[in-house]
């Protein structure tokens, strides 16, 4: 009989700590709803004490989500735990997740505490959190570089204090799969009462072994995996949700374990995170990369035509990627368009479908063939900004290899049309200068990227910008899509500014 493995998703907490992956409130709620649809067991919605904004976003998610446990991270400090409870107290299923470091290097150099003091603090704060909620998770930060006897001691004590989940983090991505197996086995064999506790693991990917280490922990008896969509997170990232879930599903014969995840929602979840953060996955990324189910080799193609299992160990449909392609163009009707959207795993309201279909028809006049990525670019619009302060009306570019580029931009600002002209080192630089003049803001372009969503000369371009506005401002991600690369770039910049105003 298969064991049930809980999936603890920390995309909104650890994932958002990845440079350039910050999200606004409406984006976080959209992600939380998708995680709920994905059927993750626990959503770590944030670190409540980190900022008033974090606390507010966790509280909003807690009020919205009903089918997943909502969790807030907290250090072993009363102020942190108070803030965590304030954030999750109205959740249908609330959890407080508190942590303290247990490795010699962390205790000595970061905490400046003795092992006895660490145990005392951990026990006291788990007991304190227990007064608020019954579901308490305790993490031994840097557990994989901790003394095993000390780890057993502190785990035993926090369980007595009321912890219901014990998490073993590989905080710095240092451990190897055999070592992880041994750590989990040692805890299972030496901690009294551990059989009544959910044993979890949280692995980082600094040596590229986060998924392997998490699966090794499951083999040793762990009950929960902490992970993120696309593996985003600090430094080299976290355990990738899609990879561990599909590994357990595909090799159920080996692991004899399963999750509650609706795997058909995996691709949709991956695309949502890519769109919101502006961080794409590599084409060769397992499960959700563009090449994950692509076959170019003649030998492979011949095998696939004979029997798909010759070169595919899972089907694209199992993760929400349609295996067949319906050709859509300007003569396609609304029913075919809606069917394609549903096949891609999206569900739109009638109003949103009407808007998307109109955009589809406009795009179909520009492109002979509409592909899946084109459709996704239409429906993954900026729904989080209801009232845009800036809207692009028109642009005129004069550029060449022996003249200075000039850009005339006309924007509607709070309903009033304003036009400015600027010169610059190329059409995009000139356009951004014109937009800066119109907005009157001190905008710093931190990063800019441009890539084709599909192939062919009529491909849509997706521009991603990361901007900072004002002294010490947060990095904001803007996105724009168009068959014209300059227009896509302008839209991305304007989108970023609108997000600044909407925050």
Image (cartoon, rainbow, N blue to C red):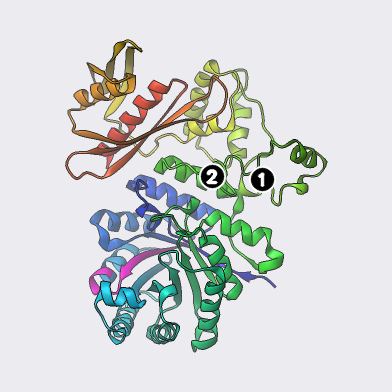
Q: Quadrant of the C terminus?
A: top left
Residue 157 screen position, x and y as percent: 39, 87
Residue 231 screen position, x and y as percent: 48, 54
Residue 473, picture quadrant: top left
Q: Is residue 176 left or right of residue 406?
A: right
Residue 64 screen position, x and y as percent: 40, 54
User: Considering depth in this image, is 47 or 353 the residue closer to the camera?
Assistant: 47
Which dot marks residue 268?
2
- Secondary element at tag 1: helix
Q: Quadrant of the N terminus?
A: bottom right
Residue visible at 66% across and 49% down in the picture = 318
Residue visible at 68% across and 64% down in the picture = 252
Which dot marks residue 9?
none
Residue 494, picture quadrant: top left
Residue 396 screen position, x and y as percent: 32, 12
Classed neighbour count for the residue bearing mark 1: other residues with Cα under 10 Å, few (<14), some (14–19), many (≥20):
some
Residue tagged 1 = 317
Who comes first in sequence, dot 2 or dot 1?
2
Residue stretch rendered in magenta on the structure: 68-80
């Amino acid at each position: 009989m298969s064991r049930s493995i809980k999936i603890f998703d920390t995309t909104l907490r650890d994932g958002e700590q990845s440079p350039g992956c910050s999200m606004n409130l409406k984006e976080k709620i959209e992600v939380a709803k998708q995680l709920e649809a994905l059927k993750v067991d626990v959503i770590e919605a944030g670190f409540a004490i980190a900022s008033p904004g974090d606390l507010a976003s966790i509280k909003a998610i807690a009020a919205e989500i009903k089918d997943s446990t909502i969790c807030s991270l907290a250090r072993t400090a009363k102020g942190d735990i108070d803030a965590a409870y304030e954030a999750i107290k109205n959740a249908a299923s609330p959890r407080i997740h508190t942590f303290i470091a247990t490795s010699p290097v962390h205790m000595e150099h970061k905490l400046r505490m003795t092992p006895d003091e660490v145990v005392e603090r951990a026990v006291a704060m788990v007991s304190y959190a227990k007064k608020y909620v019954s579901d308490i998770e305790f993490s031994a930060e840097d557990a994989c570089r901790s003394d095993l006897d000390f780890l057993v001691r502190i785990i035993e004590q926090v369980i007595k204090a009321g912890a219901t989940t014990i998490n073993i983090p590989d905080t710095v991505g240092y451990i190897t799969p055999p070592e992880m197996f041994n750590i989990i086995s040692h805890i299972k064999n030496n901690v009294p009462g551990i059989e009544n506790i959910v044993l979890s693991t949280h692995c980082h990917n600094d040596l590229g072994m986060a998924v392997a280490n998490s699966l090794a922990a499951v083999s040793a008896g762990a009950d929960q995996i902490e992970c993120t969509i696309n593996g985003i997170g600090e430094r080299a990232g976290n355990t990738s949700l899609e990879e561990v879930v599909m590994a357990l599903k595909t090799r159920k014969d080996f692991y004899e374990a399963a999750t509650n995840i609706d795997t058909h929602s995996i691709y949709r979840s991956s695309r949502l995170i890519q769109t919101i953060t502006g961080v794409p996955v590599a084409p060769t990324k397992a499960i959700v990369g563009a090449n994950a189910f692509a076959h170019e080799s003649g030998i492979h193609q011949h095998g696939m035509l004979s029997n798909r299992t010759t070169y595919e160990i899972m089907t694209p449909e199992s993760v929400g990627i349609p295996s067949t392609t319906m050709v859509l163009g300007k003569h396609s009707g609304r029913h075919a368009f809606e069917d394609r959207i549903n096949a891609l795993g999206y569900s739109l309201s009638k109003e949103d479908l009407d808007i998307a279909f109109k955009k589809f028809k406009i795009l179909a006049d520009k492109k002979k063939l509409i592909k899946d990525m084109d459709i996704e670019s239409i429906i993954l619009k900026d729904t989080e900004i209801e009232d845009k302060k800036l809207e692009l009306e028109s642009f005129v570019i004069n550029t060449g290899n022996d003249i200075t580029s000039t850009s005339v931009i006309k924007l509607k600002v709070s309903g009033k049309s304003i036009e400015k002209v600027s010169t610059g080192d190329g059409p995009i630089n000139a356009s951004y200068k014109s937009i800066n003049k119109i907005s009157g803001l001190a905008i710093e372009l931190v990063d800019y990227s441009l890539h084709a969503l599909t192939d062919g000369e009529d491909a849509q371009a997706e521009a991603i910008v990361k901007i900072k506005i004002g002294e010490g401002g947060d990095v904001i991600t803007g996105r724009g899509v168009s068959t014209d690369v300059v227009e896509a770039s302008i839209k991305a910049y304007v989108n970023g500014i609108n997000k600044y105003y909407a925050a």
